[in-house]
């Protein structure tokens, strides 16, 4: 089988008019270049070059062959340059997976800025509350919340997402401010019927009055006075600031979950992935606790 590398070499020899210059350009010896062209002619069964001590001259067959080889060499150069450009600046489609809440709350401004800065790039967001296999589903990176349990992935920490116990002023006026030990008998909004909450170092198996699999619905239910919810800061922050929700059990979060960007490998990481992750890290770094209005004693029934 004819080697494309030998075809590129032949085009270089003709273009440079010299085995020596072509060999130097391709990083091989003159002898190696001459031997490879000789082998190419043998494989083709055609004389491509007439050699003298002073110059090279293409045969008629060599001239025809050169046109095709030069076109192939140009296409190879173009392919190499394109790949290298993709390492230098974001080019092409970037496929990103994210949990629904993170995607809705964080990703729109990141994507807008990324596409504005890098017009040769495009983005596809896959928002889903399930663990996605990056390789199987052809994704460039994914946002993960919580522990990373796949050692084959590269993980870069983006920041932390605290969660707080919250309840509405109306609920607290009616039912009183609970202690950690009273959570079991409190009206709670949970995500499963068998959930355990920890507050002030006390672990309690709750009996939810409302079970729901969506954090935003849980937060809205807490605002409406249904009960106590354990929700992320990004959901309850505004409601806490304007007084629609109160944070319970002191200044410490109920729990803190780390947020990561994960991707298959750091080797030759494409610019589109590297720069998008940089933008995520800049946006979702450490957050300050929301303002906590009111006091515990103030809401005792």
Image: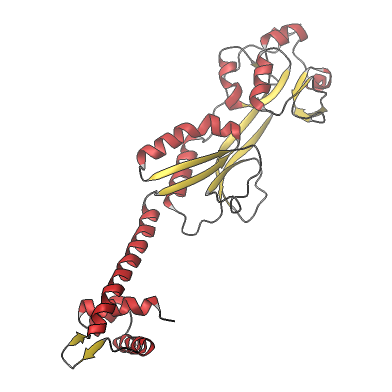
Task: Determine the image quadrant of residue 83.
Answer: bottom left
Q: Could you say which is closer to the camera, residue 4 or residue 106?
A: 4
Q: What is the residue that sits farthest to the left in this orientation?
A: 54
- Residue 95 appears in the figure: yes
Q: Could you say which is closer to the camera, residue 125 or residue 47?
A: 47
- Residue 252 appears in the figure: no
* Horizontal and vertical percent position of residue 187: 78, 17
Quarter the N terminus occupies: bottom left
Q: Identify the residue at horizontal 35%, vertical 42% (top origin).
A: 119
In the displayed structure image, the side of residue 138 where residue 63 appears, left or right? left
Q: Is residue 181 above or below residue 95?
A: above
Q: Identify the residue at horizontal 55%, vertical 34% (top origin).
A: 103
Q: Is residue 15 above or below residue 261?
A: below
Q: Identify the residue at horizontal 51%, vertical 32% (top origin).
A: 106
* Horizontal and vertical percent position of residue 155: 57, 49
* Horizontal and vertical percent position of residue 179: 78, 18
Q: Could you say which is closer to the camera, residue 40 or residue 247?
A: 40
* Horizontal and vertical percent position of residue 25: 28, 76
Task: Determine the image quadrant of residue 122.
Answer: top left
In the displayed structure image, the side of residue 141 where residue 62 appears, left or right? left
In the displayed structure image, the side of residue 222 where residue 47 appears, left or right? left
Quarter the C terminus occupies: top right
Q: Could you say which is closer to the camera, residue 291 or residue 232?
A: 232
Q: Identify the residue at horizontal 60%, vertical 33% (top origin).
A: 100
In the displayed structure image, the side of residue 123 where residue 207 appears, left or right? right
């Amino acid at each position: 089988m004819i080697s494309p590398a030998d075809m590129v070499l032949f085009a270089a020899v003709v273009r440079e008019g010299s085995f020596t210059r072509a060999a130097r350009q391709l990083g091989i010896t003159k002898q190696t270049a001459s031997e490879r062209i000789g082998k190419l002619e043998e494989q083709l069964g055609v004389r491509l070059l007439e050699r003298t001590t002073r110059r090279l001259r293409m045969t008629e067959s060599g001239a025809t062959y050169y046109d095709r080889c030069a076109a192939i060499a140009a296409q190879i150069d173009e392919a190499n340059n394109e790949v290298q450009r993709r390492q230098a600046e974001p080019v092409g489609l970037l496929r990103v997976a994210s949990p629904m809440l993170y995607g809705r709350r964080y990703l729109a401004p990141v994507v807008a800025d990324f596409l504005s800065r890098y017009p040769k790039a495009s983005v596809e967001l896959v928002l889903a509350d399930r663990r996605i296999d990056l390789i199987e589903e052809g994704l460039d990176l994914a946002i993960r919340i919580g522990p990373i349990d796949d050692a084959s992935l590269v993980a870069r920490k983006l920041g932390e997402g605290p969660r707080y116990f919250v309840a509405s002023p109306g609920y607290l006026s009616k039912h009183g401010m609970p202690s950690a030990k009273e959570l079991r008998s409190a009206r709670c909004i949970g995500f499963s019927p068998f959930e355990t909450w920890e507050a002030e170092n006390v672990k309690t198996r709750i009996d939810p009055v409302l079970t729901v699999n969506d954090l935003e619905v849980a937060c809205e239910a807490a605002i409406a006075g249904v009960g106590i919810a354990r929700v992320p800061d990004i959901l309850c922050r505004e409601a806490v600031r304007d007084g629609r929700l109160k944070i319970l059990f002191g200044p410490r979060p109920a729990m803190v979950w780390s947020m990561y960007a994960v991707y298959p490998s750091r080797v030759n990481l494409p610019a589109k992935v590297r720069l998008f992750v940089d933008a995520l890290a800049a946006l979702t770094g450490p957050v300050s606790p929301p303002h906590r209005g009111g006091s515990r004693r103030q809401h005792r029934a």
